[in-house]
Image (cartoon, grey):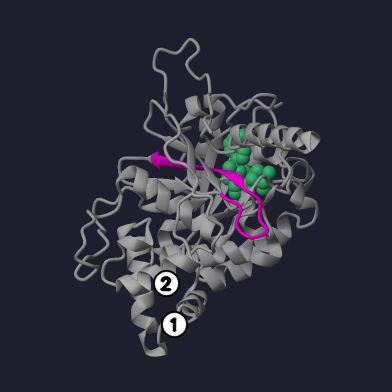
Amino acid sequence: MAVTLDLSKGNSNAPTVMPPLSEATGDDKPSLIGMNRDELREALLSVGVADKQIRMRTGQIWNWLYQRGVSDISGMSNMSKGLRDELASAFTIGRPEIVSEQISVDGTRKWLFRFPARGAGRPVEVETVYIPEEDRGTLCVSSQVGCTLTCTFCHTGTQTLVRNLTAEEIVSQVLLARERLGDFPGMDDTGPKGILVPQEGRKITNVVMMGMGEPLYNFDNVKQALLIMADGEGISLSKRRITLSTSGVVPMIERCGAETGVMLAISLHAVRDDLRDELVPINKKWPIKDLLDACRAYPGLSNARRITFEYVMLKGVNDSPTDARELVRLLKGIPAKINLIPFNPWPGSSYECSDWEQIEVFADIVNHAGYASPIRTPRGRDIFAACGQLKSESERLRIKDRRALEAAGAAE
Ligand code: SAH
Ligand code: SF4
């Protein structure tokens, strides 16, 4: 299914919109991607692998999936043909369909992936964004389709929750992005022996759970996916290079640190409860004080492992020097970085981005208090890939799909 976005109006520097790149397999067998070691063990036992071989086979399969990037079980050439056939008859390692790939004039890429229905689930479309920078390449991964929360400045927040993503779907975003970026080592058929994950020259060096959705409302699946990303036999990214961003699901923050060990980012955006209640409505449930107490207690917190506080700059709303000073006061004693995000407008949004001078005044106050406070340069604006803009195409497709389904239903 092709998505046609007219992004070129009046823009000679038009981004690239690619035609559909792959078709969904339509395979409803369970996927080996995203399984933890226990699940993979059960899967292997079910196709007759002997107990004493499970460890070795798990290592081989993970190596093929996550380090070499095969997308067909028949390509796992260091396993017997019989075993590959058994596995392929019961399981899949198929990738989602790439509905569209857009490349911004600044090199940012946005994909719309379509995952097939597996079991009782329904097909869903998910957006993933890659942001190349000089010293790193960051993949912004989605955890849900839509969001249950309704932050007023966020485009995803205008879309209701369609469903949680599975661990397979979360990990697959990374695999497919790596494949499209040429981020897997050259494939050959000699087996995984001696092949190391290249630590130098990787295209995706960092993952941020900052796409669509609230990751702490899908904790089990997100955790399973993050542990595969961080595993030395899995995608092998350092936990210091994986960041989970939350709007403030306070009761889950401790578990996030204790059970995943990844870096934490908090979408703070306001320093007074009355304003935060409005901008980030989850604040009514867990106000600023409770949120910051949970941050102070975040497992593993130290000056070397700081919490990032995200603060979207909304003109005339939360961007005064008084707000900046209050921010500094609130964060006292918490090892913190402050990320100032210029507001990314979207069609129909009622906010404006603060003026640049205002952002600089704000940043200066925060800097003088000793906090690093980079101002995040908006990336991929021409393809609506910036923070908080992930929504429109998915919804459009969903409406289209829904109409098609309704039409099909009416014809019955
Ligand atoms: N649900 C999680 C993670 C996804 S949102 C959370 O809220 O933290 C990722 C970041 O983008 C959050 O800090 C969010 O507040 C911010 N964001 C959302 N909409 C934005 C917009 N229009 N402009 C700039 N940042 C935005
Ligand atoms: Fe959901 Fe995060 Fe957007 Fe709020 S900012 S609506 S929590 S995705």
Measured along the vertical axis of the image, is residue 195 above or below residue 161?
below
117 falls in the magenta region: yes
Q: Tell me if residue 166 can be seen.
A: yes
Beta carbon at label 1 within 8 Å of ligand 1: no
Measured along the vertical axis of the image, is residue 10 above or below residue 232?
above
Q: Residues within 10 Å of mark 2 (few under 14, many from 20)?
A: some
- Residue placed most toward the observer, 171 or 207: 171
Where is residue 94 drawn, in percent x and y? 45, 55
- Confirm or deny contact between disc 2 and disc 1 (CB under 8 A): yes
39 falls in the magenta region: no
- Residue placed most toward the observer, 261 or 398: 398
Beta carbon at label 2 within 8 Å of ligand 1: no
**Residue on which the image places disc 2:** 86
Q: Tell me if residue 326 can be seen.
A: no
**Residue on which the image places disc 1:** 48
Whether residue 289 sits left or right of residue 142 in the image: it is right
- Residue placed most toward the observer, 157 or 271: 157
Residue at the image position 40 percent from the left and 87 percent from the top: 50
Residue range in magenta is 116-131
Where disc 1 sits, the SS reads: loop
